[in-house]
Image (cartoon, rainbow, N blue to C red):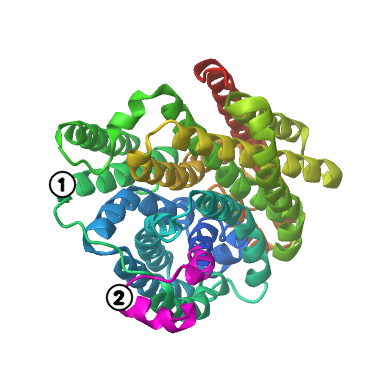
Amino acid sequence: MTVTQAAPLVRRAGREPRDNRWAVLVLLCLSLLLITVDATVLHIAVPALTAALEPSAVQLLWIIDIYSLVVAPLLIVFGTLGDRHGRKRLVLGGFVLFGLASAGAAFAPTPLTLIMARALLGVGGAMIMPATLSLIRQVFTDRRERAVALGVWSAVAAAGAAVGPLIGGVLVGVWWGAVFLINVPILLVLLPAAVRLLPESPRRTERPWDSPSAVLSVLGLLALAFGLKEAGSGSLLPFWASVLVFLGGAGLLVAFVRRQSRLPAPLLELGLFRRREFTTGVAGVLLGVFALVGLQLMLAQYLQLVLGDSPLRAAVRMLPLVLSAVTGGLAAAHILPRIGMRATMSGGLGLVALALTPTLSWGVEGHPVMLAVCFVGIGFGVQVALLAASDTIMSTVPESRAGGAAAIEETAYELGAGLGVAVLGTITTIAYAPALPAVPGVSAGGMDQARQSLAGAAHVAREIGGSTGGALLDAARWAFVNALHTTVVVSVVLLSLTAVAVAVLLGRD
């Protein structure tokens, strides 16, 4: 019997023929790309979205941030559920939910509706993402081929966040809702392909699933983020209440960690963090994505609202960031064996800090050449550091615990994206409002709206028009630049300290 004749028999037996493994990889990487792109696709669309829905500064941060903050705590939850009930079933359900949520987000009439739709997008993404890595390990049985497949997966995961603003810049020129609606036709193609190509996975119903742990992790992270945002803006709660919410979130996470240490089959394998190299690698992933995603949002607004670029022009000017990230991923595979994990990770983080430093001298004038150089340094440095961190994580755990280590790495990736927007966005908001003085001719209500965000100030300036509107916009631009400098200083300090810590904590290779 020939291989071709045997293929239907293999399918009927419930096993995927090896000839389909690369098609499965393409399908899983396209699925992963959708999820990672959605974390940053709105960065270029902020001005258009603000003009259409008029969200407050806190609502705008939630619109951007809720996706990653929902994905992060649910990754381990759905990873466990995939093991119990079948990964293919989880991926197919995630596709359906992701598509419905994308359509809802595209036509959202209010900021609150968009926030809810983005949260559902996060649930759908969390259903899909952990299964992509697990299915790659299942389909690629040859260790050398599996290494290639995992390398492609890692490159797609890192490049997705970088390419998001470029896609957003192209689509927002048509309509801001197009950044979401584009997901629907793609998923209509992926869904039937997934039904045909993805293999069934063995179900492990004997492994208990601890629902209290899932609730503690999700509510803890969301309360932590909400308290942080409200402490910076005070739009919904007084400062003391925001601090209480933040502390409550921290308490829930402490309870989650303590519960994991007592469970025989925890959702999060905390024992892995006893390895110093593993913990350092996770910190590298968290901070690398933190810097990339958070700074992308700030710099995209700088290009459009301070320098006056159109969404498409801003996306094109951020292209060096995307290209350098891809180049960094390819180069890191050759750099890592030569200089070792410690030097590669520490050097990558240090390069990002160095690339950010020139922005501290910028004002409202353009710096096209230096801007491109800075983007190249950020993209290359982050990707090199991420690959070294990922290699550190996976090389310090035994193969029997590789699945748990991968789930933690994915969680660090999404949590870093969420915290990057939450922390750096909040710092920018806190520094921006007091830096914008009252402008003669602008009402108190108009100034309050202008102090919410630079996008809000641009909206008020357009409504007022004339010299008064121009004066307000000029003052708001300078206030934003001063706030951006504060954010960059915080980022440079964090990156530099982490680079030093990596150099000290990681052993010699």
Residue at image location 51% in from the left, 39% down from the top:
390
Residue at image location 58% in from the left, 28% down from the top:
341
Q: Amino acid at mark 1?
A: Pro
Task: Looking at the picture, tell me which residue is in the foreground, 386 or 194.
Answer: 194
Toward the right, the furthest residue is 369
Left or right of 425, for residue 472: right
Residue pointed to by mark 1 = 212
Regarding mark 2 in the picture, which secondary structure is present there? loop
Q: Which residues are magenta?
A: 1-28
**Residue 457 percent location from the top left of the image:** 61, 54
Residue pointed to by mark 2 = 13
* Residue 437 visible, this angle: no
Task: Looking at the picture, tell me which residue is in the foreground, 263 or 11.
Answer: 11
**Residue 106 percent location from the top left of the image:** 48, 74
Task: Looking at the picture, tell me which residue is in the foreground, 209 or 162.
Answer: 209
Task: Give yes or no for residue 369 being in the magenta stretch.
Answer: no
Q: Residues within 10 Å of mark 1 (few under 14, many from 20)?
A: few
Judge whether 87 appears above or below 241 on screen: below
Task: Looking at the picture, tell me which residue is in the foreground, 408 or 38.
Answer: 408
**Residue 495 percent location from the top left of the image:** 59, 28
Q: Classify the position of the C terminus by image quarter.
A: top right
Residue at image location 68% in from the left, 29% down from the top:
338
